[in-house]
Amino acid sequence: MMAGKDMAQIGFASIQAFSETCMKATRPEHIAGRLGLLAEQLGYTTWYAGSLMHEHELAGRGFGFYAGSLRWSKRYTDERYCFVDPVFLAAKDDEKAVQWSDCARGLARKRTNKKALQVLNEAREFGICDGFTKAWHGFGPVPGGVTFGGEQPDVSKDARMSL
């Protein structure tokens, strides 16, 4: 949870403005920009919304909006971390929201998958210390998802539900 802040929800006016942006948008950047403003209200500096698949498959089968460190995105893609990222893998199999810090604690206790824990530890070097991922399945053949992260984001249930 964000240090020194109460648990928060995104206000109705902000959500309404986001909905209006989505309805009027003529370019993906319009939607992405407004989503970024919502995420920032809760301390999220990195996020992705779109198809839940490996980056190399996105061009042919999916879509995605991303905001965050381009260096981290490149490293994640180049190292093919989606094949060992415990949060990504959990989201592909289940629609339950996965909080990153819970996942990291579970891996540290088990000491079974050092490569998976490495993904989460390296993300911290890019200011992505905690967050959550929520998948959705059933809107077609390609699952979708959202993931939000930051240095000290509000990971309360209210904040996650707002996003």
Image (cartoon, grey):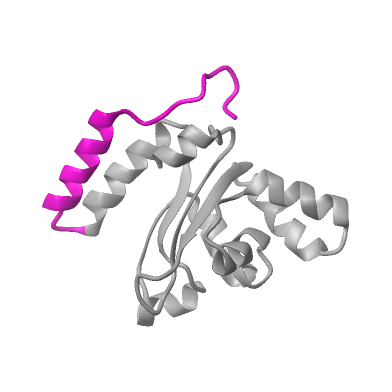
Query: Which quarter of the figure has residue 35?
Result: top left
Q: Check the image and report above or below for 25 versus 156.
A: below
Residue at 82% in and 62% down: 114
* Residue bounds of the magenta highlight: 1-27
Tell whether position 15 is magenta: yes
Answer yes or no: is residue 128 visible.
Answer: no
Q: Check the image and report above or below for 153 versus 132.
A: above
Quarter of the image with the C terminus in it: top left
Q: Check the image and report above or below for 34 versus 116.
A: above
Residue at 70% in and 51% down: 103
Quarter of the image with the N terminus in it: top right
Residue 9 placed where, x, y %? 41, 29
Give the left or right position of residue 59, taking residue 33 as reference: right
Numbered disc total: 0
Give the left or right position of residue 76, taking residue 120 as reference: left
Residue 156 placed where, x, y %? 55, 33
Residue 92 placed where, x, y %? 55, 68
Residue at 47% in and 33% down: 158
Residue at 52% in and 60% down: 95
134 vs 55, nearest the viewer: 134
Answer yes or no: is residue 146 visible.
Answer: yes
Give the left or right position of residue 34, taking residue 110 as reference: left
